[in-house]
Image (spheres, grey):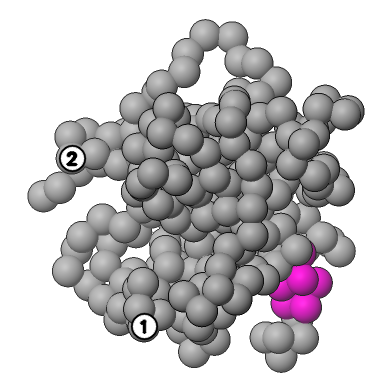
């Protein structure tokens, strides 16, 4: 049976940037063929509710062709350090509302009993500066391998410090896709740092003007080539989904 390991890349005293790792959580489950499915998720508090957020292609099994993979897990679990109870996300109940043609995000509510064990990101929901004022891009996600299954390892960092910009994304007809950001950067950065398992993790930029870290959306994919890119579902899409959650779900 395949097992997983989560390797700690950065050790020692944590910087302000490394402390952002506490907002990324391991999301894991098994599909209908008992294959491990791993992603990253995060939490947002809004109007006395706690929302879990991750990528649609992780939670709903959406393929690159925007189709459903019905072998995907019917439930997934979240590692919450120190919590005596497992946080289980019932994916099956959301299958009817999973839309693989919609922007790549998934949200659901979480019971308040888990609140003491959750770090949420709303404090980083600040106005995003233009590209000239961005000092650094950082995200933390969980990277699976085939060795040992260890649930107590922190997430790994993907960091871009120079020669990058946040750009709009176009479809094949050169129309701008309104739901996606692209962080573009040169070949000197190892894009392989953004691996399977990162999907769904929160992404942050550091604003030069005030020195604050700011949430810009959730990581969904990467593209390797002459113009390396990381693709991010915009924070506005996540915000709107949370605000409209009860309306959209008919609750």
Q: Residues within 10 Å of mark 1 (few under 14, many from 20)?
A: some
Say which residue appears at 82% left-offset and 60% top-offset. 46
Which one is in front in this view, the residue at disc 1 or the one at disc 2? 1
Say which residue appears at 21% left-offset and 34% top-offset. 148
Which residue is tagged 1? 67
Q: Report helix, strand or loop for mark 1.
A: loop
Residue 103's disc number: none
Q: Position of residue 25 (x, y in %)?
A: 52, 44
Which residue is tagged 2? 146
Write down the quadrant of residue 32 in the picture: bottom left
In this view, 59 is above or below 15? below
Q: Residues within 10 Å of mark 2 (few under 14, many from 20)?
A: few
Say which residue appears at 86% left-offset and 64% top-offset. 47
User: Number of labelled discs?
Assistant: 2
Is residue 104 toward the left or the right of residue 43 in the image? left
The answer to whether residue 57 is seen in the rendering is yes
């Amino acid at each position: 049976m395949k097992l997983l390991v989560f390797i700690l890349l950065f050790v020692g005293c944590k910087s302000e940037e490394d402390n952002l790792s506490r907002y990324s959580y391991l999301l894991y489950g098994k599909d209908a063929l008992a294959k491990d499915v791993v992603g990253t998720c995060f939490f947002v508090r809004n109007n006395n509710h706690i929302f879990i957020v991750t990528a649609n292609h992780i939670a709903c099994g959406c393929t690159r062709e925007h189709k459903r993979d019905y072998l995907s897990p019917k439930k997934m679990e979240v590692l919450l350090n120190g919590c005596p109870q497992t946080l289980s996300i019932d994916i099956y109940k959301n299958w009817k509302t999973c839309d693989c043609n919609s922007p790549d995000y998934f949200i659901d509510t979480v019971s308040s009993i888990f609140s003491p064990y959750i770090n949420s990101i709303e404090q980083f929901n600040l106005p995003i500066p233009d590209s000239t004022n961005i000092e650094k891009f950082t995200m933390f996600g969980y990277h699976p391998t085939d060795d040992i299954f260890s649930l107590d390892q922190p997430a790994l960092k993907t960091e871009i410090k120079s020669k990058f910009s946040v750009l709009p994304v176009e479809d094949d007809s050169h129309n701008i896709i309104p739901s996606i950001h692209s962080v573009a950067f040169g070949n000197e950065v190892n894009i392989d740092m953004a691996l399977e398992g990162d999907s769904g993790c929160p992404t942050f930029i550091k604003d030069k003007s005030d020195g604050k870290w700011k949430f810009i959306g959730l990581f969904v994919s990467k593209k390797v080539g002459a113009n390396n890119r990381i693709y991010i579902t915009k924070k506005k899409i996540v915000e709107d989904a949370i605000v409209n959650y009860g309306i959209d779900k008919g609750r």
